[in-house]
Each structure stands twice: as structure tokens, then as C-alpha cells.
Image: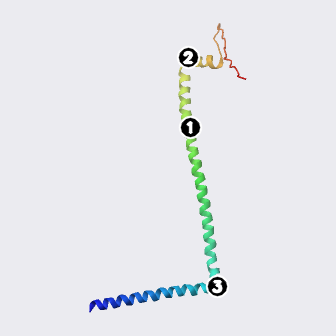
Amino acid sequence: MQEEYNQEELNAQQDTRKNSSLSRLDFFKLAYKQPIKSSTLLKALPFVVAGSIFLFISVFAWVNLNKLDNKIAILEEEIEQIEELYKRDSTEYHDLKNSPSLIEHIAREDYYMKSEGEEIYVIKKVSKNKG
């Protein structure tokens, strides 16, 4: 008896599902046949315009943010290079300040300076052009 009742209930549920799905299809068919009213478009227009403006601003901000991130990365690399140069130059400055013999060595080699009574001969290598 219970099984018959469950079977009947199951059949009834399936019938209502079939009828409801058909009615849904009929509803959509009818909805597409009816023209859209202009008042509906006028109500939706502010939302479409506001959404478009929001989308434009968001994309514009995202593009600018990416550009600024790239600039930051480039500037950080430059900072690292400048810090390395500063360390090298500060050690060289410290060495020059504390060592007179180093100053004399640089003056002789780079600027061709000499002490009194010395003669300097500069020999330059001449490269042969193949032609």
C-alpha cells in the first residue's frame, strides 16, 4: 500500500515538472514576442551609463597602476646601481685621503705628472689598420 502511494506521488511530481517546464517555455516565447517598452529602457539607461563610466575609470586606473609599478621597479634598480657606485667611490676617496703614495701613483699614470729632475717618455701603441 505504501509503495503504491509513493509511486503515485512520484508520478504526480513528474507530471507537474513537465507541465511547469512547458509553461516556462511558453512564458519565454511570449516574453520575446512582446516589444520592450521605452519606459523600461529609460529606467535601465542610468545603470548602463553608470556601469560604463565605472568600467572606464577602473580600466584607466589599472593601466596607470601598472605603469607606475614598472617605473618603481626601474627606479629601484637605479638606486641599487647608485648605491654600489657610492660604496666604490667612498672607499676610493678614503684611500686617496689617507695615502699620499696612491695620489702620486694616480698623478703619474693618469695625468703624466713628474717630480723635479725626472724625464717622462710616453709610448703609445699604434694599431695597424687592415685595409
- Viewport quadrant of the C terminus: top right
Mark 1 → mark 2, Cα distance in angstroms: 30 Å
Relative side of 36 to 88, left or right: right
Q: Which residue is mark 2?
A: 101
User: Which amino acid type is marked by label 2?
Assistant: Ser
Q: Nearer the viewer, mark 2 or mark 3?
A: 3
Residue nearest the viewer, comparing 114 with 56: 56
- Viewport quadrant of the N terminus: bottom left
Residue nearest the viewer, comparing 29 with 81: 29
Residue 81 tag number: 1
Return the disc, 2 or 3, that comes first in the chain's sequence.
Answer: 3
Mark 1 → mark 3, Cα distance in angstroms: 66 Å
Residue 14 screen position, x and y as percent: 40, 87
- Above or below, 81 relative to 92: below
Return the disc, 1 or 3, that comes first in the chain's sequence.
Answer: 3
Residue 115 tag number: none
Residue nearest the viewer, comparing 17 with 122: 17
Return the disc, 1 or 2, that comes first in the chain's sequence.
Answer: 1
Mark 2 → mark 3, Cα distance in angstroms: 96 Å
User: Which amino acid type is marked by label 1?
Assistant: Gln
Q: Residues within 10 Å of mark 1 (few under 14, many from 20)?
A: few
Residue 56 screen position, x and y as percent: 62, 64
Q: Residue at x 61, y 86 (%)?
A: 33
Disc 1 to disc 2: CB gap under 8 Å: no
Q: Residue at x 58, y 45 (%)?
A: 74
Q: Residues within 10 Å of mark 3 (few under 14, many from 20)?
A: few
- Above or below, 113 relative to 15: above
Q: Residues within 10 Å of mark 2 (few under 14, many from 20)?
A: few
Residue nearest the viewer, comparing 68 with 114: 68
Residue 81 screen position, x and y as percent: 56, 37
Q: Which residue is mark 3?
A: 37
Q: Nearer the viewer, mark 1 or mark 3?
A: 3
